[in-house]
Amino acid sequence: MQSPSHPTTKPQVEVRYCLGCGYFPQASWITNEFWSEFSGTVGLTLTPVEGGRLEVLLDGEILFDRVAQGGEFPTWNSIRQMRRAVRKKLSGAVLASSESAV
């Protein structure tokens, strides 16, 4: 059993992609970018959806939404911004964990 001072959940990144639209290659690229930096420190989920959607969420908060971006796919710069958001979330979790241990 884990002590209450150590969080048991890690940040969750979910990539929702329109399977019928053929967005799996983009979704797998995005997921791979997260895996290459955060392997094991964040949860990664690929979720097939409909409606032309390609979305990236961090703990339920939308980081990227293709529809809201006017139909544009993520660029390398937008991937970098999303990874920064995950790093910030991870550093906040580490800080909170170290503060509760004091």
Image (cartoon, rainbow, N blue to C red):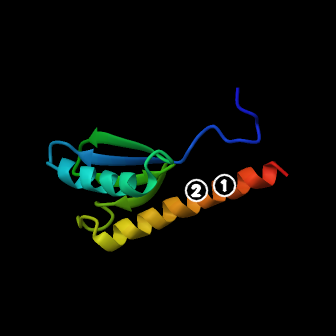
- Residue type at mark 1: give it: Val
Q: Quadrant for residue 69, please give it.
A: bottom left
Say which mark, if any, is on residue 90. 2
**Pick the front one: 22 or 102:** 102
> In the drawing, does residue 1 fall left or right of residue 25?
right
Q: Position of residue 26 (x, y in %)?
A: 22, 55
Spot the residue most to the right: 102
> In the drawing, does residue 100 fall left or right of residue 27?
right
Label 2 neighbourhood size at 10 Å, few (<14), some (14-19), many (20+)?
some
Q: Which secondary structure lies at badge 2?
A: helix
**Pointer 1: what residue?**
94
The residue at the point 32 percent across, 42 percent down is 46
Q: What whole-number distance in Å separates the C-alpha atoms at marks 1 and 2?
A: 6 Å
Q: Quadrant for residue 4, please give it.
A: top right
The residue at the point 48 percent across, 67 percent down is 84
Label 1 neighbourhood size at 10 Å, few (<14), some (14-19), many (20+)?
some
**Residue 48 visible, this angle:** yes
Say which mark, if any, is on residue 32. none
Spot the residue most to the top: 1
Q: Quadrant of the N terminus?
A: top right
Q: Quadrant for residue 44, please give it.
A: top left
- Residue type at mark 2: give it: Leu
Q: Position of residue 21 (x, y in %)?
A: 15, 48
> In the drawing, does residue 68 fall left or right of residue 92?
left
**Pick the front one: 4 or 68:** 4
Answer whether labels 1 and 2 touch (C-beta < 8 Å).
yes
